[in-house]
Structures are given as C-alpha cells and as structure tokens.
Amino acid sequence: MNATVPLTGLWSAFCSLPALDAVGRLVRLRAYRGRPAEESAAPRALLVLVPSRAEGLRVGGLVEDLARERRESDTRMDVVVILDGEDAEAARRVRDAGFEALVKTPAGPSKGAALAFATAYLAGTAPERLDAADFVVVLDADTRLPEGWLRGLSIPVGTDVFQLPVLPVRTPEAGAARVEALSLAIATRVEDAARDARARPVRLRGKAMGFSPRAWRAGPARGARTLVEDSETTLALLAKGFRIRALPGPAALEEPPTGSAEMSRPRARWFAGHLHLLVVGFADLVSAARRSPLGALALAADLFLRPRALVLAFLAATAASAAALVAGGFLPALVPLALAFLGLLAEALYVRAARRLLGSSPDVPAVRAADLGTALLVWLRAIGLAILSPKRWHRARPEVVGG
C-alpha cells in the first residue's frame, strides 16, 4: 500500500497536465472578448515560397491564384516554387505563370529541408530578394487563394511572425475529415485568437504563415532537425523572443483530406516527430518558459498532448485499471481518475463554447458520434504506424497526375 502512494502521486501529477490544459483553455475562451483594435498596414513587398513535392498539376491552381492576386494588388510579390525532386509538369505550370521554379535534388527528407535549400539558393544568388521583402510567406502547393486575398492582407505594426487561418475549400466528407475540420477551425479561428489577445504563444501550422526577414533567418532558414518543422520553428522563435501573431484573415483554402489511410500517414509523422521534438527542442522550451511560464505550459500542452481527447481517455482508462488492480488502493487511484474525467468534462465544455463562437458554416459541419469513432481509429492507426514503421515518417505521396 505504502509503496503505491508515490507512484500514484506521480501518476496523478501526470494526469493533471491535460486536465489543467483543458480547464485553462476553457477559462481563457470564456474570458475572451474579441481582438483589441490595432494599427495595421498592408505589406509593400512579399517573397512567397511554395514547397512542392510530387504535386503534379495541383501546383498550377495556386500559381494561377498568385498571378491573379499580383495583378490585382499594389503589393510587390516575388514567388519561388521549390520543387522537391524533379516534376516537369509542375515546373511548366510555374514558369507559364511567370514565376521561378527551383528544383531540389535529391528530394526530401522534409519541407523544412526544402525551405532551407531555397534560402541558401537566394543567399548565394540574390540576397537582396529576401531583404527587399517585408515578409516571407509560405504556402503549400495544394493551397488555393480566394479572390482578393492579397488586398485583404493587413498586418499589425511591429509583427515579426504571423499565422493565417486555413479553411477547407469544400464541405469535408463524413468521418475523420469532419473532426479534423472542426479541430482546425477551433485551433486557428478560436484558440489562436484567444491566445493572441492575451499575448500567449501561438503555434505555427506549417502553411499560410509569414516571417519578417529577421525572423526567417532565426527560424525556417536554419532548417529542421525533425519532421515537424512548423512546431520546431515555433519553439525556436519563441526561445529567441519572437512573438507569433494569429491574424483573423485572409484565410487560405485547402482540400479536405479523404480516406483514413491518407489521414493516418501525416498523423503518424506528426506523432513520431513530436516525440523527437520533445528531446531536441527541450532547451528551446525551457528558454520559452523563462520568458513566459504559463505561455510555455500552454504551448507544450498543444504540442505534446494531442489528440487531447484520446490522451484523456487513455489516462482515465489507465487510472480505472490501476484502481481495480491495486489492493486497497482505490482511493489513491481515484485521484488520477477524477483528474482525467475533469479534463474530459472541460474539453467537452470547451468544444461546445468554441462551436458557438464559430457558428454554423459549410466548412465546419456538425460532427457526429460516428465521425469521432472514425477519427479515433485514424489516430490509433497513426500511432501504430509511428511506432512500428518509423522509417515511413515521410511526406512522400504517389505522383499526382491530375488536378
């Protein structure tokens, strides 16, 4: 009995982390009263980098959107598409739109490597292109931009790094894709806004993000040691004192995922990559904690305690099993069980409150119990892939030959 008390205490402390995170997000959201008014301005010049790997014709849609936005705006826009491996059709589409196609060979291993390659190329051939830009903007090759996107881009004065919202271009199919759409909408349009209003750390999402040249050199230009370069860059920039802003718009558009296999692969990379980041990025997390302990705790929970509902359910099930197995130890084991259920309750209330703020829209349809079940299976499959097939934490995909 006595021997189990210290172990139960450690387990209770661990169980308190996701519960505290869920309660903290709920309190922060209920205290959120909207964004304060700020002086903002349209950028005078942008350098847009588009990493593309085996995208085929899909990159053509984005470069057409960029060409249209450049024609219809006073903002100067320099566009470089980084082809991560040979892609003749994508290169032709890029050049037909009047932009530069930069080919990186051999391909891989990550988007971070492609961005570092582009930075080295610019530094060696035309460093003034980077310095002439107010911001370096990163867009994924399969992203689309609504008309007027560039005219709607207004950035608060003094901003070094910003993240824009990303919306599905059409209503996601039933299943895990709807859960993903709701999760992304809450993260980028509710949670990030609430954090930004309180000057709390905001996480980069890997696409539709912008950096001043100074922030670019301190973050993405250095490359990435993990395959979750957006999270790694977030920690690196926060450790150096940069504030990442969450802007309300304009939103970029992307195709919603389809099929559990398509969704499991990137989540396997996400899961395994963040385990790696917990090791290699720990020093940056400590540096960020020195600047803002509460902010670093909230960010760490966002990075390392996802998917939250799955983590909380696991903790609850484990605590219940411990209570049943430890003879006479039900009351000590009840503490982590209660903490886990407290987290689940706060999570449910948080999603409900966030859903009210989001309102009803086609891009965030209602999520049913069957959708949650499918999403759970996707994550379980992803975790299995990450643990059993670590060599497959890549972002390669079959060659896309159609739009």
Image (tube, rainbow, N blue to C red):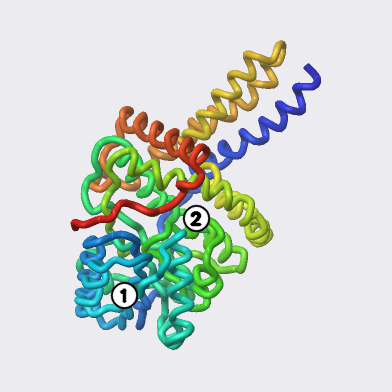
Horizontal arrangement in the rendering, residue 390 relative to residue 176 (left or right):
right
Quadrant position of residue 37: bottom left
| Labels 2 & 1 near each other (Cβ < 8 A) | no
> What residue appears at the point 35 percent right and 75 percent down from the top-left corner?
102
Percent position of residue 78, x then y: 33, 80
Which element type, helix, strand or loop, lies under badge 1? strand
Q: Answer left or right for 201 relative to 92.
A: right
Distance from Cα at disc 2 to Cα at disc 1 = 24 Å
The quarter of the image holding the N terminus is top right
Residue corresponding to mark 2: 227
Residue occupying image coordinates x 33% and y 57%: 166
Please report the residue visible at 30 percent of the width from the left and 51 percent of the height from the top: 398
Labelled disc at residue 101? 1
Looking at the rendered image, the quarter that the C terminus falls into is bottom left
Please determine whether, in this image, residue 277 is positioned above or below residue 244. above
Q: Amino acid at mark 2?
A: Leu
* Circle 1 Cα neighbour tier, 10 Å, few/some/many (<14 / 14–19 / ≥20): many
Mark 2 residue element: loop
Labels 2 and 1: the sequence-earlier one: 1
Name the disc covering residue 354, or none. Answer: none
Q: What is the three-letter code of the residue carrying label 1?
A: Ala
- Residue 191 x %, y %: 44, 50
Residue lying at the far right in this picture: please name it. 2
- x and y percent of residue 171 in the render? 22, 46
Residue 337 higher or lower than 389, as above or below: above
Residue neighbourhood size for the residue with mark 2, other residues' Cα within 10 Å, grouped as few (<14), some (14–19), many (≥20): many
